[in-house]
């Protein structure tokens, strides 16, 4: 188990290095000038800015400086936000995105497991047909459409009641988090529902299920102790990447609901060609995703006693 963990950590470090290198190369191939920022500057000011951000050095030197600073946990200073470090941007705004993502994944996991189990129990009957139709909608419709529809629903509810029960946008209270987390988790919930349904239908015909029925175990005990426990394993496998994707991927939802999360600043950095913020947040997102995948791989061995990791 220790050897497996060490191998996974080494592979994760190599993956993060590749992400950082690919991001650095890509950013230096993007056309545009981040120092202009829609304003003309004199040659002297430009030289000072290039010296400040290390742009007066060769690309190779910039790469090794970037990698050296990254190993120390320093992603540099933002090009567009005066004297603000990328680390400070991540520290101040990632907790907001993480909070939204945790609520969304909790909603998605609970709903996916519940609806997936129900569709398997009522296979090819009305509940199964209705839920699978909604699953197809959840997978097919983009999140920004659900975000707009969610805001419209809140506006109508607040207008009908005559006061603001749930805020349409903003951040700060639990009521602000309800609709964004629901919208952000819908796609993942649909994916987990479909996966849970397929897994449940495979498990229901296994020999150990027949044996449990032959022993006279109650259907409830068979469902929770044998069917659900074994059917949930594939869901756990994809849950790690989905947690990272939701936690770091709510860019559009954060913009629509005016949430001051890290995704909002990433989008602004792309629009303004803020190289340091783009590279820093991309490497941070990539490292977080790799970490979640490693954690899920290790936990999978504890959840399923049939797995022997070496």
Image (tube, rainbow, N blue to C red):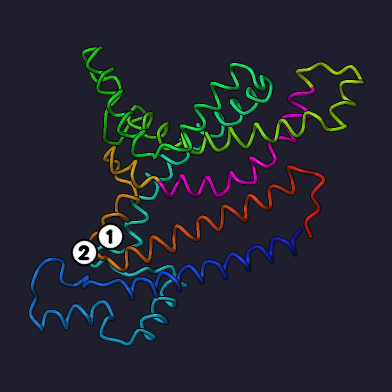
Residue 97 position within the rendered picture, expressed as x and y whole percent measured from the top left: 39, 45
* Picture quadrant where residue 198 is located: top right
Between 90 and 30, the one lying in front of the other is 30
Tell me the mark number nearer the camera, choosing from 2 and 1. 1
Q: Quadrant of the C terminus?
A: bottom right
Looking at the image, residue 230 sits to the left or right of residue 95; the answer is right
Q: Which residues are magenta?
A: 222-249
Rounded to the nearest angstrom, the CA distance separating label 2 from label 1 is 8 Å
Compare residues 207 and 169 and report the one nearer the observer.
207
Q: Nearer the viewer, residue 262 or 112?
A: 112
Check disc 2 and report its element: helix, strand or loop. loop
In the rendered image, residue 62, in percent from the top left (x then y), is placed at 36, 81
Dominant secondary structure, magenta: helix
Q: Earlier in the sequence, mark 2 or mark 1?
A: 2
Mark drawn on residue 80: 2
> Which residue occupies 70% across, 35% down?
199
Pointers 2 and 1 in contact (CB under 8 A)?
yes
In the depicted structure, whether residue 60 falls above or below residue 190: below
Q: Position of residue 147 (x, y in %)?
A: 33, 34
**The disc label shown at residue 269, or none:** 1
**In this view, which residue lies farthest toward the top?**
161
Query: Which of 206 and 170 lies nearest the eye of the viewer?
Result: 206
Q: Is residue 27 magenta?
A: no
| Few, some or many residues within 10 Å of mark 2 (<14, 14–19, 20+) | some
Write the residue at 87% across / 21% down: 213
Identified at 43% across, 67% down, the residue is: 73
Residue at 72% x, 30% y is 201
């Amino acid at each position: 188990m220790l050897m497996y963990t060490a191998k996974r950590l080494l592979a994760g470090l190599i993956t993060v290095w590749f992400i950082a290198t690919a991001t650095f190369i890509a950013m230096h191939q993007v056309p545009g000038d981040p120092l202009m920022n829609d304003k003309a500057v004199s040659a002297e000011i430009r030289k000072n800015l290039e010296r400040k951000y290390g742009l007066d050095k060769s690309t190779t030197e910039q790469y090794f400086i970037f990698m050296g600073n990254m190993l120390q946990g320093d992603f540099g200073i933002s090009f567009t936000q005066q004297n603000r470090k990328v680390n400070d941007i991540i520290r101040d705004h990632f907790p907001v995105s993480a909070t939204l993502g945790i609520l969304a994944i909790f909603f998605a996991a609970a709903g996916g497991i519940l609806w997936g189990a129900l569709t398997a129990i009522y296979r090819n009957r009305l509940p199964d047909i209705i839920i699978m139709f909604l699953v197809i909608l959840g997978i097919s419709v983009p999140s920004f459409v659900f975000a707009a529809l969610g805001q419209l629903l809140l506006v109508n509810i607040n207008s009908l009641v005559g006061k603001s029960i749930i805020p349409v946008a903003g951040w700060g209270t639990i009521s602000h988090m309800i609709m964004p987390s629901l919208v952000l988790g819908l796609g993942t919930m649909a994916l987990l529902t479909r996966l849970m349904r397929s897994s449940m239908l495979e498990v229901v015909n296994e020999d150990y299920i027949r044996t449990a029925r032959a022993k006279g175990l109650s259907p409830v005990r068979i469902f929770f102790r044998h069917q659900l426990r074994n059917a949930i394993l594939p869901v756990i496998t994809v849950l790690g990447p989905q947690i990272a994707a939701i936690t770091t991927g709510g860019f559009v939802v954060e913009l629509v609901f005016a949430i001051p999360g890290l995704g909002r600043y990433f989008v602004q950095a792309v629009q303004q060609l803020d190289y340091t913020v783009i590279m820093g947040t991309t490497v941070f997102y990539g490292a977080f995703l790799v970490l979640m995948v490693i954690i899920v791989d290790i936990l999978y061995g504890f959840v399923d006693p049939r797995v022997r990791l070496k």
